[in-house]
Image: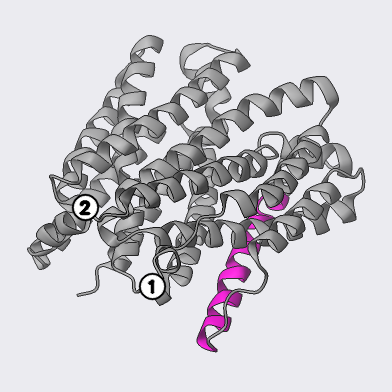
Amino acid sequence: MKLKPFLLLITALAVVSDAMLLPFYPQFFTARFGVNDPQHVGAYVAAMCLTVMFALPLWARVARLLPLLPLLVLTQLAAGLLCLYCYWTTSLAGFWLLSLAMIAFKGSYLLVYPYVMSLSDEGEHTATVGLLSVIVHFGGIAGALLGGLVLQGMDGGQVFLLMAAGDALQIAICLYLLWRQPRVAAASAAQTAPATTADDAARLRRVYQLGGLMLLFYFSAYLVRAFFAQHWQAVSGIADSRLAAVVFAVPAAMALLGLWHNRRRARSGQAPLGSLPAMLLLGTVGLLLQALPDTLPLLLGRCLFGWALFQLTVQLDVQLFQLGTPASYAADYSKINFCQNLGVLLSSFAAGTLVAGHGLAAPFLVAAGGLLLTALAYPLLAATPRKLATA
């Protein structure tokens, strides 16, 4: 029995669950607790990000001792129970405490990513990373749509019941895999054992260099997300939020197209089209076009940015898994994920300041500068694949 499809399903369920409330926290806090303060929402989202940043390295350490699938059973059970407490609680302070604990336990599902990569041959890494990227894109959209439907027809707390149901499904999948293949537990423990090779210090140095590159990239990529719908509505003059959501989702469609394109080239033995620096420059052009006060350049820029975003995400992640071995994937990924989330966190603070002081186009201009800086830093921070470094 193949594990990868089931592990990808676990990832999809987790992403959908995570995205249900993400676009709607202002409405949720207003309806549930009577809090109508944007700064409060911003602080909560920042706290969520920090929780994941510090929880994942902890789970990576635990996974050295406890096999991944049994670990997921325990953490998702705890997350599901905390979801139910979040549904019942009427205390704002209690909600903060319980929901952040829930997010810490939910964050363990991110270890599925390096585990899936450890099950893939090196030649399959690009295709696997691309598929996971598409799952994240469309899982986020599906989760937001599902959360919007629930909030429109029911009390916002009902979302936590759906989240608990998602956790229950993940537990069921893990138990099924352990029942069908009892040796999976031992195998997952072996995959996450700490590496003891002599070149660990050199590998870690390259991982941290790649982390710095990721921080710049994720800061730039996420800087334009928060206020995109408002920017589109201001440029197009169309106030329809559904159309804004469709335009916002263009990068997801480009990711699906990019996945098809990469797989087609892989079947003919070709690498993905365009080097990483070239994709950074393409993304820069896409961001600059989106900053223009005209609908057609904005749409073209959205397409170019979406294509570049997908290819950059794939190429950067593939570099990470070229650096180490399956035994080091989880620990290395936890470090990279910390840098990615730090970039997202910094962008969430910067976006509001830029819009307040310089208008809705400012995040696109600063993000373009960030991608250009990433391209300039690439020769210095690019990670050298392990097999090349030791050749």
Q: Residue at x 40, y 59 (%)?
A: 323
Q: Quadrant of residue 279?
A: bottom right
Magenta stretch: give its range. 246-268
Camera-side residue of 172 and 216: 216
- Between 302 and 138, the one lying in front of the other is 302
The local secondary structure at tag 2 comes to loop
Image position, residue 217 (x, y; %): 62, 45
Q: Is residue 244 left or right of residue 30?
A: right
User: Which residue corresponds to mark 2?
Assistant: 196
The numbered mark, 2 or 1, whose residue comes first in the sequence reads 1
Let me know if residue 373 is in the magenta part. no
Q: Amino acid at mark 2?
A: Thr
Q: Quadrant of the N terminus?
A: bottom left
Q: Position of residue 270 (x, y in %)?
A: 57, 83
Q: Is residue 258 above or below residue 176?
A: below
67 relative to 225, above or below: below
From the image, tell me which residue sits under label 1: 122
Coordinates of residue 11 in the picture (x, y in percent): 36, 54
Pair 2/1: label in front:
2
Which residue of the protein is positioned furthest toward the bottom in this rendering?
268
Residue 264: give x, y in percent of width and height.
56, 82
Residue 26 can be seen, yes or no: yes
One can see residue 150 in this view: no
Q: CA distance from mark 2 to mark 1?
A: 21 Å
